[in-house]
Image: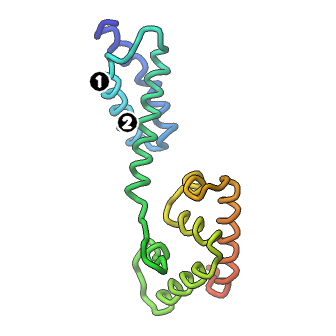
Amino acid sequence: MNSNKFTDRLLAIQDNLLSFALILTSNRDDAYDLVQDTTLKVLDSEDKYTENINFKGWVFTIMRNIFINHYRKAVRCATIVDTTEDLYYINLSSHESRDTPQDSYSVVEITQIINQFREEYRVPFSMHLAGYKYQEIAQRMNLPVGTVKSRIFFARKRLRKDLDDYRYSD
């Protein structure tokens, strides 16, 4: 395919790309960025396109892959691996406005409770708190995804029960 025809076909589907990008990102600015990244990638990959492939499907696949790669990168950057023995950093709240000693004590209490869980519940629950997805936990622990979900559910349930007196209503 000559370069002008390729570019014309790409420009003709820009509105479709923006619609798909809005579905993926749910944010107009991010969608525009994704369309731009996709357009550049497609233009750079022109030599890889063959005539017998659905052009629109090929471009949409590139967009989806770019979105997935950006998402995975963002998750990796946001994931904190806590190697402290008592999982201190995992149990810190995202805002550091500790005004009272009771707030610090609750972190210690939560950590103690989690550390009392049997390993089969503590490990997946801690990994989930660290930002791992169910599928990733299942792969690392060599367990079915349903088992991982159940163990995390029961760990949450036990934690809620054990910390019941720390709960308050607005």
* Location of residue 28 by image quarter: top left
**Residue 165 x/y as whole percent:** 66, 87
**Residue 100 x/y as whole percent:** 45, 91
Nearer the viewer's eye, disc 2 or disc 1? 1
Q: Residue visible at 56% across and 86% down? A: 109
Badge 1 element: helix
Quarter holding the N terminus? top left
Toward the viewer: 46 or 116? 116
Using a 10 Å C-alpha cutoff, classify the residue at mark 1 as few (fewer than 14 neighbours), some (14 to 19) or many (20 or more).
Answer: few
Which label sits on residue 36?
Answer: none
Badge 2 element: helix
Colour scheme of the rendered structure: rainbow
Label located before the other in sequence (2 or 1): 2
Dot 1 amino acid type: Asp
Using a 10 Å C-alpha cutoff, classify the residue at mark 2 as few (fewer than 14 neighbours), some (14 to 19) or many (20 or more).
Answer: some
**Residue 81 x/y as whole percent:** 42, 66
Circle 1 is placed at which residue position? 44
Dot 2 amino acid type: Tyr
Image position of 127 with respect to 138: above or below: below
Q: Residue visible at 48% across and 30% down? A: 19
Could you tell whether 157 is left or right of 85 in the image? right
Image position of 75 with respect to 59: above or below: below
**Residue 162 x/y as whole percent:** 67, 83
Residue furthest out toward the bottom: 101
Which label sits on residue 32?
Answer: 2
Image position of 7 with respect to 124: above or below: above
Quarter holding the C terminus? bottom right
Could you tell whether 140 is left or right of 160 in the image? left
Residue furthest out toward the front: 142
Could you tell whether 45 is left or right of 86 in the image? left
Image position of 11 with respect to 145: above or below: above
